[in-house]
Amino acid sequence: MCESSANNVLSGENMKLIRCRTIYPLLLAALTLFVALPFSHAEDTAEDLFAAKLERFISMRAENWRKLADFSYANRLYSYARLDDQRARKLGAPPKEKRKYPNEPNPPGAVKLYGQWANMRTEMLARVDSEGIALLEWCRQNYRPGVRRVANEITEELPYHRAAHEALGEHYSEVLGWVKGKTADKVREGLLPFGKGWLERDKVLELRGEWANAWEVDKEHFIVRTNTTPALSQKLLDFMIAFRKCYLRRFEDFRFRRTDMELTLNLFADMKSFDIANKYLFPNGSPPSNIAFYFERTGQTYVVAGTGKDGYLFSRETVAHESSHQFLHQYSGVYCSHYYDKPGAWINEGLASYSQTALVTANRVTLAGYRSHYHFNIARQMLRKGTMEPLEEFVLMDGSEFSGSRRSARYYSYGMAVISYLLNAENGKYRDDFYRYVYAILRGRGSETLFERTFKEAPAHLEPAFHEWLLLKTTSESSLLN
């Protein structure tokens, strides 16, 4: 074979190698693309389906919030209407016409209207629950990346939704509430946090039961210190956050100096720990109450938890009463002692007693239902029995009249009834004057003539209308409940 022929043969073999090296990778790439295409297409389809389903889920919520907003606005529940409109807009509902939300008295039949709102909200939450669980299950089977997004959407409406929290990889602890990550792992092992480490659950509960080792839980403007459980503290914090919004909305015209501070509430598991704490606060005497009080030296409230079938509980009325004292003085930047010994100091307990009418509807709070409250009924009975002091005497009372006497308990009810009248009677005729009256008292300007100068009417002249309003009764008094 000549050299040229050999070269030709080698060239042929080389060409075969070159073709193999070129074609095989191309074939492999084509095969890979062919195999991958259906899966990629399926993934895209699942993602598109998820986006459409999620949009429908969010739109359902937006539509329901819009219905709630329209109901609230049409029935003059303006504080609710404003919040409902905000939620609807946040979820993408188109804005309504320019609405104003006046801070005016509740309309006749407000308690019934708030109940209707609560029923509508309950129906909405039932849909969020059922449709949310269905969407979670669909995501598990068809589009795993969507699970976390759906779970977060559910907890926006239902903060304690078990399936949603579990979908987020969280574990429920009766002590800590919902936990995740390494904390959840430790809890599953029977441990709880203490100091910088972890101890056996029973040991931690024993230690935390002592007030010196109490838990501290914080959230949005509040700290709860307690020897109950963090889980209960979270529920208390939820109420406090909602109550604070309600309080600031209703009494925004008190011209508070500062409302962004963090406030502390102490929740005691039992009387034993309550008494131990009181020995430090009152070494030479007894606390102003045997179950709850606000202490102006610390700026904190102190409340004893109750017990019930669900474990430790707390009284919303009691918490609202004591927190009213805390809000009034901390936000105003004044001590009770600044006006305690002057005429008009009755507003302190009167406002706190009025705050006990806090009505909770689906994690929202409003001050309503005063006509059905026991303080209001006691004031009625006083008037009917002829034991109610003249109004001109009552408005001159200083703080000492509300402690240390057998009659002082009645004054809480009297004060609550007077404030109910000044805030709500005659479509809020006296409301603005009442705000100015409270502002003057808190600034230490209480005097024998302040009431008449502020309301431009002598207490004795106002009294007949107040008594008539207090005894107001129709064939359907429930229709007038505010």
Image: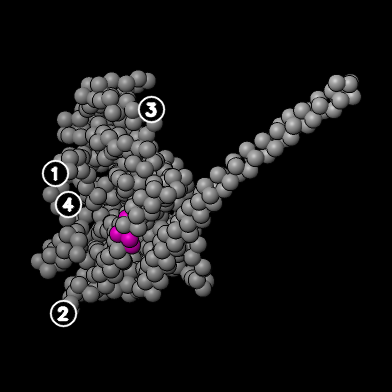
Quick check: marks 2 and 3 in contact, CB under 8 Å? no
Q: Earlier in the sequence, mark 3 or mark 1?
A: 3
Circle 1 residue: 309
Circle 4 residue: 409
Residue at 37 percent of width and 38 percent of height: 169
The answer for how far apart the CA atoms under marks 3 and 1 are is: 31 Å
| Three-letter amino acid code of the residue under disc 1 | Lys
Rendering coords of residue 460 (x, y %): 26, 69
Rendering coords of residue 411 (x, y %): 20, 55
Which of discs 4 and 3 lies nearer the camera? The answer is: 3
Circle 3 residue: 182
Extreme residue in the left direction: 385
SS at mark 4? helix
| Three-letter amino acid code of the residue under disc 3 | Lys
Mark 2, residues whose alpha carbon is within 10 Å: few (<14), some, or many (≥20)?
few
Rendering coords of residue 424 (x, y %): 32, 68
Quadrant where the C terminus is found in the figure: bottom left
Quick check: marks 1 and 4 in contact, CB under 8 Å? no
Which of discs 1 and 2 lies nearer the camera? The answer is: 1
Extreme residue in the front direction: 1
| Three-letter amino acid code of the residue under disc 2 | Thr
Magenta range is: 124-129
- Can residue 9 be seen here? The reply is yes
